[in-house]
Amino acid sequence: MSVYTNEIELLEAIRSQNGESWSAINPEHAARMRTQNKFKTGLDIAKYTAAIMRQDMANYDADSSQYTQSLGCWHGFIGQQKMISIKKHFNSTDRRYLYLSGWMVAALRSEFGPLPDQSMHEKTSVSSLIEELYTFLRQADAREMGGIFREIDKAREAGDQVLEQKLQNEIDNHQTHIVPIIADIDAGFGNAEATYLLAKKMIEAGACCIQIENQVSDEKQCGHQDGKVTVPHEDFLAKIRAVRYAFLELGVDDGVIVARTDSLGAGLTKQIAVTNTPGDLGDQYNSFLDCEEVSVADMKNGDVVLNRDGKLLRPKRLASNLFQFKPGTGEDRCVLDSITSLQNGADLLWIETEKPHIGQIGGMINRIREVVPNAKLVYNNSPSFNWTLNFREQVFDAWVEEGKDVTGYERADLMSAIYDATELAKEADEKIRTFQADAAKEAGIFHHLITLPTYHTAALSTDNLAKEYFGDQGMLGYVENVQRKEIRQGIACVKHQNMAGSDMGDDHKEYFAGDAALKAAGDDNTMNQFG
């Protein structure tokens, strides 16, 4: 007996137990509604997706070609369409996640209007977006299964039992659109208690994985901008523990924590770490401070000094009351941040870099793995990088080192379109194409994501449509470049009424009102023009 058939029988028994007053309830209709709503709560989703992510991490440890990927999204519809497309093109959502970007929440979801990535947006908008994403993904499940149920009804009407059984098997083995979301909690939006409270909201909404960074909450900057300020390790570890407690309290025992370090590009700190003994974690943090040796006589009013090995050291303090790190210490600080985070409850690392360079990333992960052998990275394949220019420069420099002739190229102008068809550009593009697989193998990257792809695709597609529609092409600008492509490529959203739930609504009207139902999917529905 199929799972679907068994569900119908269970509901038939429930109906019978409730007597004549339930006689109008159709057990199969109720079974369909149950089947279309597999996940009842966000915690159901968090537990389900955490198990997926943990298995993916184990698979990657065994075989680095089994890395995972995601794209950032700022609306439930965007996330839904990604997963529908992935299922359409690859027949599986395996190893494909969604990323929730704090940057895009700030830029696109705040009631204040567009904001920079500085944790000024409403923190509950993060958990609200997680809930919205999973609402749309659950609707994608319901819509897809609803289509199969309607096909089952047609097969029955035609007396085709073989087809009916095949369709029931599709329901029994349906692969959900629900996938893990890596959710950005920024720097925690306050102290450790504030981090814990927001983490709970995010987990209750469905998050199985929370990413937190080591910047100061009230000085937080985008990882690819200047002015970043980090906190001492003990402050950051308290927030990692706060997130772990939130997972455990809610019963998501295998929830995943990504510890992000911005130290590579962060030259400032707001605090001097507490240290009790030479060489402890606080002392190691302070050892990176840019200091000058002073005597008591050299000290000025309000000076802060450190005692190290009997010497008085005065950290360089800016007018902003921030302290400065020694130049060139970023990589060493990233390595220490990463090791410390993994030793204190984090599961994955995120090292924010200024360029996509496998050698740089791999060098740091190799040092980390000397202490934590199974260290793994989540890596931001960021639109903040000029990928074309970076990789053309990398190829150019490699050619120079190899003694290859580069006289036909001007390094300072490699972004120019005049180089697009050249051997150098083709080699650079091939390195971009294989970057994720190469970095997974050589630099310990378990998960590759693009933080802001749909921010850029929305702007690009809108620019193209506006240019055509408001220009000479008029309506053809939409038809040729949008609708016709949707039809040719089999984009489900071309039937936008169906995508928004019109057919599911008709199903429910029929369940609730029977023959009296006023349904939208009749002969006069213009969606029928799309077959």
Image (cartoon, rainbow, N blue to C red):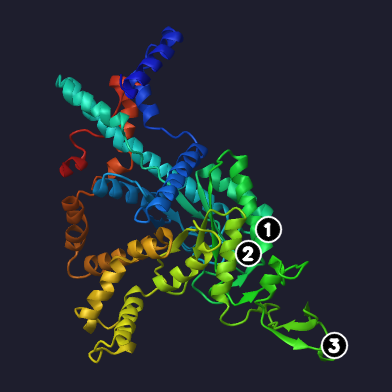
Q: Report whether 474 appears left or right of 270.
A: left
Q: Quadrant of the N terminus?
A: top left
**In this rendering, does residue 455 appear at all?**
no
Q: Which mark is residue 217?
A: 2
Work out how far the residue at label 2 is from the one at label 1, CA to CA, in angstroms: 8 Å
- Residue 477 or residue 4, whichever sits in front: 4
- Above or below 73: residue 219: below
At a point 41% along the width and 56% down the height, the residue shown is 73
Q: Which of the two discs, 2 and 3, labels the residue nearer the N terminus?
A: 2
Kind of element beneath mark 3: helix
Work out how far the residue at label 3 is from the one at label 1, CA to CA, in angstroms: 36 Å
The image quadrant that residue 271 belongs to is bottom right
At a point 23% along the width and 82% down the height, the residue shown is 419
Q: Amino acid at mark 3?
A: Val
- Residue 519 or residue 47, whichever sits in front: 47
User: Decide: marks 2, 1 in contact (CB < 8 A)?
Assistant: yes
At a point 22% along the width and 75% down the height, the residue shown is 426
Label 3 sits on residue? 296
Find the residue positioned furthest to the front: 370
The image quadrant that residue 390 belongs to is bottom left
- Residue 25 or residue 139, whichever sits in front: 139
Kind of element beneath mark 1: loop
Q: Which mark is residue 469?
A: none
Work out how far the residue at label 2 is from the one at label 3, CA to CA, in angstroms: 35 Å
Label 1 sits on residue? 191
